[in-house]
Image: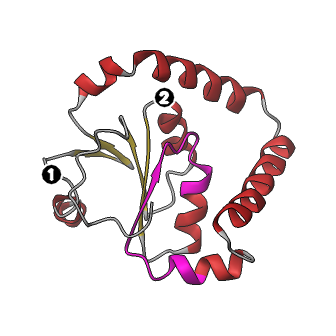
Amino acid sequence: MKDKIELFKGIFKKNIEINGNILILNNSSSFENQEQTKEAFSEKWNTWFIKSEDRDKKNLYEYQKRWYFELYGFRDEKEFRRFLNSKKIIFDAGCGLGFKSKWFADLSPNSLVIGMDISDSVLIAAKEYFDTKNLFFIKGDISDTFIKDNVIDYI
């Protein structure tokens, strides 16, 4: 745990708490500014996760991968893996249920991947992907991350 605390000291502007794979920032004022967004997306993601069949989740995840490749110009997962493996710290801003965060972590096991979302979806993601050792989640406002300048390699 001490190694994790030291690692995160180099990333964040202020001290954080670590609870499993959840990073806790004390930025509650930003939550107040985003309350409506937080509530809407918390309900949306919680409902979708609970009601969706595994088949539906797999189909959505495959669709999202194809969409991501097309959007960012990667030919396939092999090319994307090579790209990610050169990154030390990857930040998934607005990660929702953390699917892409998990995908990034799996493709680049030597990278640190941080997913952040203002909604309660990160709590579901943290529970779902607890065993992924290089993946952490923050419940917070992506407009106020407390991340130091020039430490993230890929957003």
Figure quadrant of residue 148:
bottom left
Q: In percent of the image, x 68 and y 61: which residue is there? A: 71
Specify few, some or many for label 1: CA neighbours under 10 Å numbering under 14, 14-19, or 20 or more: few
Secondary structure at badge 1 equals loop
Left or right side of 26 for 125: right
Mark 1, residue position: 13
Label 1 to label 2: alpha-carbon separation: 23 Å
Dots 1, 2 in contact, CB < 8 A: no
Q: Is residue 80 above or below residue 47?
A: below
Q: Disc 1 marks which amino acid?
A: Lys
Residue 136 falls inside the magenta stretch: no
Left or right side of 126 for 73: right
Image coordinates for residue 139, horizontal then vertical, percent: 38, 36
Give the residues in magenta: 82-101
Mark 1 or mark 2: name the one nearer the start of the chain: 1
Q: Disc 2 marks which amino acid?
A: Asp
Q: In percent of the image, x 50 and y 81: which residue is there? A: 85
Quadrant of the snapshot with the C terminus? bottom left
Mark 2, residue position: 120
Q: In percent of the image, x 46 and y 15: which residue is there? A: 36
